[in-house]
Image: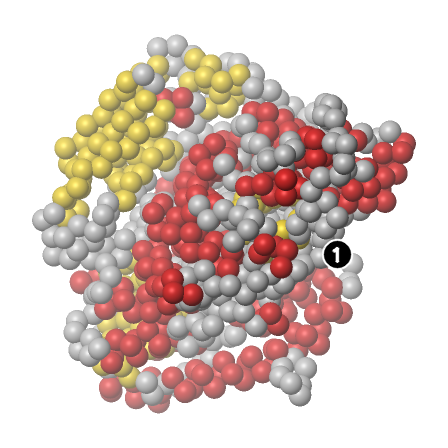
Amino acid sequence: MKKYTRFKFQPCLPIGADGRRVTASAEHALVSKQAASEGMVLLKNENGALPLKKGEKIALFGKCSVAVYEGGGGSGEIHAPYKKNIFDGFEEKAKERKVRLYTGNKGFYEEHVRKEHLRVTGDSEHKGKYDDEYQAVQQMPMGDERINRNYELYQLFQVAEPELSAEDINAAASEADTAIITIGRISSEGLDRRAIAGDYYLSNTEKKLIDDVCAKFEKVIVVLNITGVTDVEYIAENPKISAILVSWFGGMEGGSAVADILCGDVTPSGKLTDTFVKSYDFYPTKDTFEESLDYMNYTDDIYVGYRYFETIPGAKDNVRYPFGFGLSYTNFEISNVLAGEEKGLITVSATVKNTGSYAGKEVVQVYFSAPQGKLGKPAKQLIGYKKTKLLNPEEFETVAISFKVNDMASFDDLGKIEKSAYVLEKGDYEIYIGNSVRDCAKQYTYTVNEDTVTEKLSSLCPPCKLEKRMLADGSFEALPLKEESFTFGVNTPNTAKAPEKETSFELVGDEITLDEFIAQLTDEELVDLVGGHPSTGVADTGCFGANEKRGIPAVPTADGPAGLRLIPNREVRTTAYPSGTLLACTWNPEIIYKVGECAAKEVKENNIGVWLTPALNIHTNPLCGRNFEYFSEDPFVAGKAAVALTKGVQSQKIAVSAKHFAANNKEVNRTACDSRVSERALREIYLKGFEICVKEADPWTIMTSYNLLNGCHTSESYDLITGILRNEWGFNGMITTDWGVKNDPVKEVKAGNDMKMHIGYPDELKEALTNGNLTRADLEACVKRILELFLKLD
């Protein structure tokens, strides 16, 4: 097909084999299922409760056994042709005679869910409570009342757990030996969760259900169909609960994936990419997360997630399940560990042997412990990992993991050794190998004889209102308060000569250079190109471009990241893949790449050019409503997952838009909330995943975030966009704003933010050109990067 035909004419042409559609195809559903089963994490398995024995009689409990959460709300919500719940999965296993399934309470749960959905969303004849109140709430001024009402409205979709009668439980117990209880939690873009019963904690009704079922069944298994980290103390400590599986948001095949694991058709191999603690009160951000609508003070600094719990004195005792943890049905032995350094590269190799009786996969994790020195360091930091192939009993595999010595450096933002530089402090760097941050052993020591500057940079995005930050001993140090000062660079004018006659964009590269093409564009055309345009075809998030007269196509965009998101009235159903958190828990770049590749094919088949994914903000606090889209509390895992997804997507000549750049870790009042973070934490935690993705995968676009960063909106931050992203990391792609936020479009262009979505503000840009606040060179630089993106697309 001729270049840009899909964008210009929106042809209905399938791209699958033999002329079949790939969108929501059986092949893509299988990939979704494989990814789901590989990222679900087994937390508990007492006395060999799992896998279920062939023919075991089971009964299912909990409204989420029929109303599964396949994904979260907002831009990450995918409209799939179906979604398989836990009952669906086990009905398939019952047909295969792998289990005997009691279905007596299925109707009770289905009727409860139906009534609740009718009450909330209504039908063709009746308006639901949500639609009836939502618009009125949105007209309220930002404040506690509006936030509380929004939260209450969205919680309607949670569907409260109904109370099952004693008679119903007794009937199930008379027909089954094993109970499987599913507990669910959902969250959404635009809202944050709360540390209350029914959200972060179990509700009293859920506790009663667990108690009543445990009283009647010898074996009880709990499945957690949850958005992210949720309190598990009530079940983890309960001796009557034999097993716990975290199924996360498993996509459209999530219910089947759960059944596959519980029946032993798949051996669980997922590992946690977050730390589960014994109470929300133990998180270092419990006070700062909800301290203000207007800001969040990142006083925990670099001590995020396991970096806090493994380092700060006494914090270890508050962990229930550590980072990197996950059980299997089989056992593995890691042996023959070798490690060494050559030319600045440390390589670790180890032999992994399956010593158990089930086939399975193991994840070898490498951590380092740096000397505390003057800067202070986390006790351990992940620096490499490798997942094995499927190993049969007694089979083994040797894996090798390499990383640069300089990757162990820390950023000195105050000048304790060398200001604004990455530094390897003198001392011993100990290398640990194992299968979690807790279950790992020291295997190698690399010694640095003197303090060494590995990279000299500049002070960029410094905090101006963050008064203190945490140190490795749990105390705090005061930070200097700087005055807000935001500057912009100067763009070099395009000196190329415009062709004598007008030339189409389609001829760029053949008969004309891009600079020559841009030279012929008028100021009005440049202004128009840096703003979004209306959607075409089935797209509903607008287009980059366009200028029909100049032959510039309108390139449609689409939301992600759990699949191609098209709103229901487009009547195109797409594959719903697992959430970002689940994908990260696979620790498997190959399956994440495959998800990206398959999703990109659906994007292309529906004539869209840019998929708004991956989302790699950090799980700073478990209550962030959008955590399900994000990968981890750890920037290394997040970065590597983003690399795999980006490479998979862009292999199909579809652009990603890595988001949300940066420090967008809270949803409430997100367009006006200031993330106050030190330069060290910014570089080591909140930017590190983006840096890995940029340097290893070359994402073609990056999306700035809604929030302010140290007093400046990210889309207006020259320090962030040009200083760090372009000049330091070498990013040469296009940058777009997030959708619908009204920051200063002039400052955005001058900062290097190329595209304003979902619409532009041409009048303000024209006025700035007239009064000299903006130059043609500024606009030409942005348009050039936009059109360079277009040249990469198919």
Residue 136 in view in this figure: yes
- Spot the residue most to the top: 450
Name which residue lies at 37% across and 41% down: 316
Residue 502 position within the rendered picture, expressed as x and y whole percent measured from the top left? 75, 39
Colouring method of the image? secondary structure
Q: x%, y% of residue 176?
A: 24, 82
Amino acid type assigned to the residue bearing label 1 in the image? Met
Residue plotted at (24% across, 61% down): 266
Foreground: 600 or 691? 600
Numbered disc 1: secondary structure? loop
Depth order, front residue of 707/518: 518
Q: Is residue 259 above or below residue 623?
A: below
**Left or right: 683 in relation to 734:** left
- Percent x, y for residue 270? 31, 53
* Vertical relation: 370 (above or below) 259: above
Q: Farthest residue in the right direction?
A: 771
Q: Is residue 612 visible?
A: no
Residue at the spot 68% in from the left edge and 66% down from the top edge: 149
Residue at 24%, 80% (x, y): give it. Answer: 95
The vertical placement of 45 against 181, above or below, is: above
Residue 484 falls left or right of residue 613: right
How crowded pointer 1 is (Cα within 10 Å; few <14, some 14-19, many 20+) is rated as few
Q: Is 312 left or right of 258, judged from the image as shown?
A: right
Q: Quadrant of residue 505?
A: top right
| Residue receiving disc 1 | 142
Judge by depth and name the residue closer to the eye, 486 or 321: 486
Q: Residue furthest left?
A: 394
